[in-house]
Structure formats: C-alpha cells, structure tokens
Image (cartoon, rainbow, N blue to C red):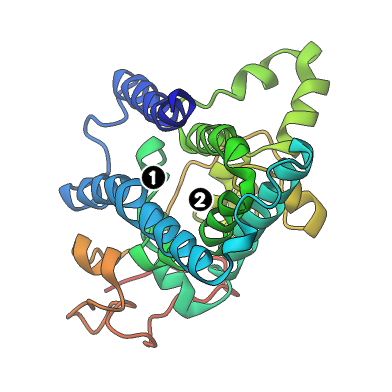
C-alpha cells in the first residue's frame, strides 16, 4: 500500500517543484499562455490520472477477470527483468508509435493538437492532449493487462520514473544544460541523450520549424526512452533549444473544443477542429507555413 501511494505522490511532487522553479524563473509572468491555455492544462492534468487511466484499468481488469480468470497473476513469479521489458515494449514503445502516428494521420493529429499549439514550453504542457488521445492510447490498455497478469509491482516503480522523465523533458528548467556545460561530462551526455528524453531533444520536437536547424517537429517522438527514435531513424540531437514553438495552425478554439474533439467541434469554419476534415488541416508533409485566419 505504501508503494502504491508513493507511486502517485512522486510525480505530483516533481510536477509541483518544477512548476515552482519555472514560476520563479518568470515563465508564467507575462507569458504567452492565455486563460484558455491554463484551463486546458489544468483540466488535462486532473482528468488523465483521476478519470481516464483509472477508467481504463477498471474496464480491462473487469473484462479479464470475467473472461480470463485463470490468467490473473499468471506472470507474478517470473523475472522482474521480463516485467520491465514488457512495460518498455507494450507501454513505452507503443506510445512512441501512437505519438508518431498522430503526426502523420490528420484525424489523430487533431487529438494531439492541444499539445503543440501552445507557443512556449513548461511542465504544464506535458498532459495537454484531447481526452480521446489518452482514452485510445494502447500503452495504457496494455499496462492494465500487464498489471492483471501479475506485473503490478514493477508498475509501481515504472510509472513514476517514466512520468518524472517526461515532466523533466517538458520543463523550462532545462536540466540537461548541466551535462553540456562541462566537456568532461560529454561522454555521459552522449549516453543520456540517446537513452531517455531530455529537454533538448523534446523541445526540438515542439519547435515551430526545422528551418532553424534545431527543431524537429516530425521526429523525436520518444516519451521515456529516446532510444526508440535512434532505432527507427527519427532522432535529431543538437544540444540546443528552439526559440519558437507551436504548430502552424494557431487558431485558438475554446478549451472544451480542443479537449473534447470530435464530440464537440469549433463553430469557426477556419478551424481545423470545425470538422474531421477541413481545408485548414495540418499537413505533416509541410514543415511550416504562416497561418492567417
């Protein structure tokens, strides 16, 4: 029970500490975030861990208990290393492909769009996605299955570690600058930036345009492990940070439209959230274009 509580507390504490550090650094003073942006971020921050993930776990465990009662804790006594590998593949690797697909498929992009239209980074960006983006995310469903199969103990450690890495990768604290500052740490930096997501590599993913030589909007998809990008050829490492962020379609729809699309849709025909297919749809083949309403 203690470990279960700490697995929830640790990411919350990390988010709070990073948020305070960002605030002290001036990120939330006279920034580019609107009240609409803050609402998106706070609603997403609350609904994912309290409604979406628990709801998926309840459905999966109920279904498997009903259909496959004999499989409960089936792998409980197998090697913990196999459990770790199972989560890395069935959760983190599938999330890499889910994320990558959302930058290729125009309909899926609209569910991921809230994560990219914000024009600056920060720890609050981490969970900005439409509700259905998370509701259909394969990794959450697979994780619930693995827990039912007896791998729940590892999940208590795996999840807070993964969330901490992801939060740090979005944070304006840019902790990896320390590794780049000293030449003696260069070999360590080389390993770290190819293993896990860092601010430099993930900020590049959020950069507005590859024309700046730093940004990589259609790459650097990794969440916990960046090595998936290295393996599948989508990695770009510069040890620098973009100065412009966002996605080219910057029309600001109400928070409830961004989070509940396509159940709720924009009334503005210029918005790509006006319909599942519009004339202003994001085109992944185009790196960037100036957008005007």
Q: Which residue is mark 2?
A: 206
| Crowding near the residue tagged with mark 1, few <14, some 14–19, many ≥20 C-alpha atoms within 10 Å | many
Tell me the tag on residue 125.
Answer: 1
Report the side of 152 relative to 41 (left or right). right
Sequence-first tag of 1 and 2: 1
SS assignment at label 2: helix
Q: Position of residue 128 (x, y in %)?
A: 37, 52
Most foreground residue, 6 or 247: 6
Q: Position of residue 73 (x, y in %)?
A: 63, 49
Q: Measuring 58% from the left and 59% from the top, which residue is drawn there?
A: 142
Asked whether the residues under the numbered discs 1 and 2 touch, taking CB atoms below 8 Å apart as contact, a structural biologist would say yes
Residue 41 in the image: above or below residue 291? above
Q: Measuring 30% from the left and 54% from the top, which residue is drawn there?
A: 51
Count of picture labels: 2
Most foreground residue, 244 or 277: 277
Report the side of 158 relative to 50 (left or right). right
Q: Position of residue 67 (x, y in %)?
A: 54, 72
| Residue 249 in sight here | no
Q: Position of residue 135 (x, y in %)?
A: 41, 65
Indicate the quadrant containing the N terminus: top left, top right, bottom left or bottom right.
Answer: top left
Indicate the quadrant containing the C terminus: top left, top right, bottom left or bottom right.
Answer: bottom left
Most foreground residue, 250 or 3: 3
Report the side of 110 relative to 293 (left or right). right
Closer mark to the observer between disc 1 and disc 2? 1
Most foreground residue, 79 or 111: 79
SS assignment at label 1: helix
Tell me the tag on residue 194.
Answer: none
Q: Quadrant of residue 179?
A: top right
Q: CA distance from mark 1 to mark 2?
A: 10 Å
């Amino acid at each position: 029970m203690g470990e279960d509580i700490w697995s929830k507390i640790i990411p919350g504490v990390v988010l709070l500490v990073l948020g305070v550090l960002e605030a002290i650094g001036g990120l939330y003073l006279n920034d580019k975030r609107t009240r609409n942006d803050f609402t998106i971020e706070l609603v997403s921050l609350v609904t994912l861990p309290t409604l979406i993930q628990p709801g998926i776990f309840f459905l999966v465990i109920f279904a498997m208990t009903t259909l496959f009662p004999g499989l409960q804790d089936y792998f409980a006594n197998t090697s913990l290393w196999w459990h770790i590998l199972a989560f890395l593949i069935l959760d983190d690797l599938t999330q890499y492909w889910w994320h990558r697909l959302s930058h290729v498929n125009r309909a899926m992009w609209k569910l991921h769009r809230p994560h990219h239209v914000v024009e600056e980074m920060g720890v609050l960006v981490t969970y900005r996605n439409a509700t259905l983006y998370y509701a259909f995310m394969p990794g959450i469903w697979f994780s619930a299955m693995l827990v039912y199969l007896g791998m729940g103990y590892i999940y208590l450690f795996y999840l807070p570690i993964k969330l901490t890495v992801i939060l740090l990768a979005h944070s304006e604290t840019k902790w990896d600058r320390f590794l780049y500052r000293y030449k003696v740490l260069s070999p360590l930096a080389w390993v770290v930036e190819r293993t896990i997501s860092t601010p430099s590599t993930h900020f590049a993913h959020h950069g507005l345009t590859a024309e700046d030589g730093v940004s990589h909007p259609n790459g650097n998809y990794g969440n916990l492990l960046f090595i998936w990008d290295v393996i599948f050829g989508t990695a770009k490492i510069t040890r620098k940070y973009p100065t412009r962020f966002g996605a080219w379609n910057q029309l600001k729809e109400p928070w409830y439209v961004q989070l509940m699309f396509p159940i709720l849709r924009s009334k503005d025909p210029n918005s790509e959230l006006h319909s599942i297919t519009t004339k202003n749809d994001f085109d992944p083949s185009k790196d960037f274009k100036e957008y005007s309403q």
